[in-house]
Image (spheres, rainbow, N blue to C red):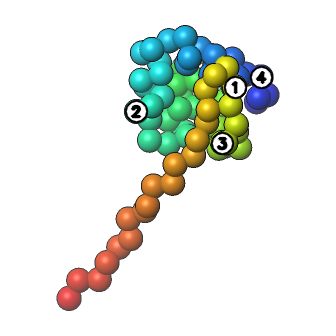
């Protein structure tokens, strides 16, 4: 993927309120990548994570770390 493809996707996100809501509701970078792929953009979750902290087309990409669940011991 080129970052140009991702920038085009972000431009579309900015112009399309329904797509913006879908992106905001996505939990993982892979989910966002699938939205982009469904629209014909060659983007992977890894590509999105590498773009974290940057802005393009008026959209800032921010990685949010969600705490994982850890198995506990039950006696």
- The mark nearer the N terminus, 4 or 1, is 4
**Crowd tier of the residue under label 4, counting other residues whose Cα lies within 10 Å: few below 14, some 14–19, many 20 or above:** few
Percent of width and height locating residue 61: 61, 36
| Cα gap from disc 2 to disc 1, whole angstroms | 20 Å
Residues at discs 3 and 2 in contact (Cβ within 8 Å): no
Q: Residue furthest bottom?
A: 75
Q: CA distance from mark 2 to mark 4?
A: 24 Å
When asked about the image quadrant of residue 41, the answer is: top right
Q: Can residue 51 be seen in the rendering of this structure?
A: yes
User: Disc 1 designates what residue?
Assistant: 56
Q: In this rendering, is residue 47 above or below 3?
A: below
- Look at the image and tell me in which quarter the C terminus lies: bottom left
Quadrant in which the N terminus appears: top right
Q: Mark 3 or mark 2: name the one nearer the start of the chain.
A: 2
Q: Secondary structure at mark 1?
A: strand
Q: Say whether marks 2 and 4 touch (CB < 8 Å).
A: no
The image's mark for residue 52 is 3
Q: Secondary structure beneath disc 4?
A: helix
Q: Which residue is mark 2?
A: 25
Looking at this view, is 61 or 41 the one in front?
Answer: 61
Does 10 sit above or below residue 32? above
- Residue 54's image quarter? top right
Does residue 18 sit above or below 56 in this rendering?
Answer: above
Q: What residue appears at the point 58 percent right and 32 percent down from the top-left corner?
A: 33
**Residue hosting label 4:** 4
Q: How many marks?
A: 4
């Amino acid at each position: 993927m080129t970052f140009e493809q991702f920038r085009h996707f972000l431009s579309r996100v900015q112009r399309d309120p329904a797509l913006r809501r879908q992106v905001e509701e996505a939990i993982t970078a892979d989910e966002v990548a699938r939205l982009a792929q469904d629209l014909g953009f060659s983007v992977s979750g890894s590509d999105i994570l590498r773009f974290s902290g940057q802005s393009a087309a008026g959209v800032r990409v921010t990685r949010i770390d969600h705490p994982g669940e850890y198995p506990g011991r039950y006696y």
